[in-house]
Image (cartoon, grey):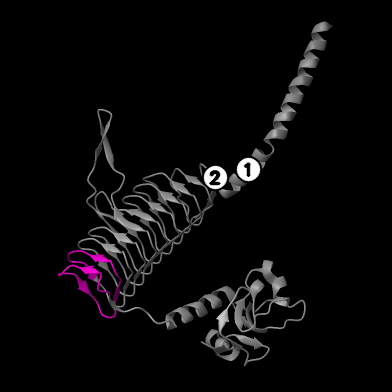
Amino acid sequence: MEFTAKIISDFLKGTIEGNPEEKVTDISRIEEGKKGTLAFLANPKYNKYLYTTEASIVLVNNDLKLEGEVKATLIRVSDAYQAFASLLNLYTSSLPKKRGVEPQAFINDNATIGEDCYIGAFAYLGGNVKIGKSTLIYPHVYLGDNVTVGDNTILYPGVKVYKECKIGNNCIIHGGTIIGSDGFGFATEKGKFQKIPQIGNVIIEDDVEIGSNVSIDRATIGSTIIRKGAKLDNLIQVAHNVEIGKNTGIASQAGISGSTKIGEQCIIAGQVGFVGHINIANKTTIAAQSGVVGDVKNEGEIILGSPAIDIRDARKSIAVYRKLPEIYSNINQLEKQLKELQDGSNKE
């Protein structure tokens, strides 16, 4: 598809600097830009590439001040990154979508499939499964009995959804993710583990995106819940009866123990670990590799470390930690001097 700078600018409500008839047919990174492509500049670290890129059109922020000659046609917008995302969404929505049921798929006789769906080869739809309209079920997806999937949702190859689980509208779930596997529940009796049946389910609300190879355990009783608009990266473990709030984002390799409740609009960085049965306030930010061992009660708090504490205290602790070798050396020197003074006093 071909777009001119004017068409792009009109769509984004931007301002053109350069040739409004400049045309692009593809996108590129600004440092690798080629003739006929569109790039964007949002991070100041990449400013230098604006003056060398071969990209024909570049999206930039309104407040960017030029420091040299630019060959590309510029489109100024309030937020170049957001504008670029909008263009990508426009592009992907214009691509042809798969439709129909491939003959190798297995669909139980009492399953219900909405209009304009795609069911790929070797997908398995169990008894009483309900699929909304315009949903894409890629090959090798497994949907157990009584699973519900909403409208305009995409389940990529290899997704497994165990019985009774519910997935909302406009969700995206990437390959290898398992939803509704048993929670890690065992009782001990005479030194042996006795399995506790996990009879709950998982509920994933609308507009949720889940990366690849994520495991979300079904509740022991009740539901494990991922609230509307939450975004989960790859390789995350969500244990039984966890609740993740609306519009919360969680990066890769986080692990959330059972019955932990995470609030709305939280940001959780990579490799964060949570103990079970704690509550995290709304708008909490948790830095990478933190270990969260207790409730976070104050909305908007930023925490860091293991155990995680307020980031201001954590930074002070880190500053002291870095000086420990020097402090240790000074203590040794002081002890040596003290001993010399004591020895001299004893001789007198």
User: Among all residues in the image, which is located at the extreme front?
Assistant: 104
121 or 128: nearer the viewer: 121
Residue 321 position, x and y percent, is 64, 38
176 vs 150, left or right, is right
259 in relation to 134, above or below: above
Q: Which residues are magenta?
A: 102-130
Q: Amino acid at mark 1?
A: Ile
According to the picture, the residue beneath numbered tag 2 turns out to be 305
User: Among all residues in the image, which is located at the extreme right?
Assistant: 348
Q: Residues within 10 Å of mark 2 (few under 14, many from 20)?
A: many
Q: Is residue 114 magenta?
A: yes
User: Among all residues in the image, which is located at the extreme left?
Assistant: 109
Q: Is residue 264 magenta?
A: no
Which disc number belongs to residue 318? 1
Residue 155 position, x and y percent, is 34, 67
Q: Amino acid at mark 2?
A: Gly
